[in-house]
Amino acid sequence: MSVEAGDLVVRKSYGRDIMFRVTAIRGGEAELLGEELRLAADAPLEDLEKVEEGERRKRKKAARQKEEDCYRLFRQEARKIRAQSEYEATSGYQSESDFFELPGRVLHIDGDANYLERCERVYERAGIPVYGVHTAEEKMADEMPSLLEMVRPSIVVITGHDAYWPAKGETNDLKAYRNSKNFGRAVRAARNVVPQMDELIIFAGACQSYFEHLLKAGANFASAPERINIHALDPVYIAARISFTPFMERVKLHELLRNTPSGEGGLGGIDTKGVLRRGLPAAKAVGPNYRLHLK
């Protein structure tokens, strides 16, 4: 059975562990992008096996369940954060008052259009204002200044696909990574516009990315400390937690990283403030980005 661009496949030599989509075929090699993981890979055609419809549905169902679990966990933690800080929003007033919340706006730049669409659905379900952009990883840095000027985000997510190739160098060799250099350039382009780490929160990276390089470039959070694969929704989880953490509080790093789909091996970061702002009275809040809380 011949393999063509657009087919869903698995690699026999890796135990059929990850489902990929074939993006191109050159000679006897296929270029692959992960369907559920932000991983890029190449493989000889003879190592590939098409995914049958039944298997595809099974894997998609499992992926949807993981997406739902991620969303549910986020909602639980958002309620916990809100319960802990609601008193601060109304203290000092003679009576309980209605108030409104203004979550941080997210600029999500993604090298994969399918993942971008999935991420946008989760942002929207969570009530987080988001502006999504699909562009190739190598173009992200060039587009960054104009996007920041147009969107004025509190949080920027820079992601897509990446891979570490041991045959091309050690883990501290930037040339051994598919897109870590491009992600790093995009981070630096953002920091040239907004240098302050708490004025613009940046997540950068994908599967197996050069974690240390991305932090040095200026990211608050990045992947992947242990060069493992990360889930498609890991960047969303990080951005969502920051968006709903009040700006007077710091994000609890250990709790945040532990609860992501990939865990601390896949993601890391530095002390960072939240970006949520609350206001009174609720009657004065207008527009789609405001969330009302009525007593």
Image (cartoon, grey):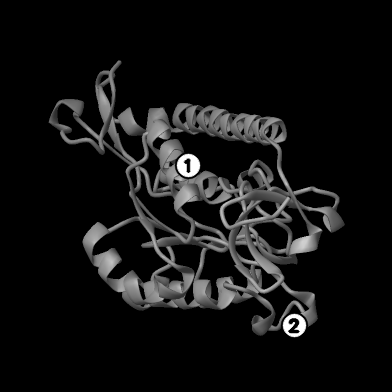
Of the residues shown, which amino acid type is indicated by label 1? Arg
Quadrant hosting residue 4:
bottom right
As helix, strand or loop, the secondary structure at mark 2 comes to helix
> Which residue is at the front of the view, 195 or 116?
116
Residue 252 visible in the current orientation = yes
Left/right placement of residue 250 relative to residue 3 reads: left
For the point 44% across and 77% down, which residue is it?
Answer: 188
Residue furthest to the front: 1
Q: Nearer the viewer, residue 111 or 128?
A: 111
Residue 215 in the image, given as x and y percentages of width and height: 57, 71
Return the residue at label 1.
118
Which element type, helix, strand or loop, lies under badge 1? helix
Residue 169 seen in render: no
Kindly identify the residue that appears in the image at 41 percent across and 43 percent down.
Answer: 120
Which class describes the residues within 10 Å of circle 2: few (<14), some (14-19), or many (20+)? few
Image coordinates of residue 95 in percent, x first then y, are 26, 18
Mark 1 or mark 2, which is nearer the start of the sequence? 1
Quadrant housing residue 65: top right
Give the residue at mark 2.
168
Label disc, if present, on residue 251 of the rendered structure:
none
Place of residue 277 in the rendered image (x, y in percent of width and height, measured from the top left)? 32, 43
- Residue 17 vertical position relative to residue 179 in the rendered view, above or below: above
Q: How many marks?
A: 2
Could you tell me how far apart the alpha carbons at marks 2 and 1 are, in whole angstroms?
32 Å
Does the CB distance between marks 2 and 1 fall below 8 Å? no
**Residue 272 falls left or right of residue 54:** left
Taking 251 as reference, is 108 left or right? left
Image location of residue 181, percent across then percent down: 55, 78
| Quarter that holds the C terminus | top left
Dot 2 amino acid type: Lys
The residue at the point 31 percent across, 28 percent down is: 90
Instruction: Please tell me whether residue 1 is drawn above or below residue 177 in the rendered image.
Output: above
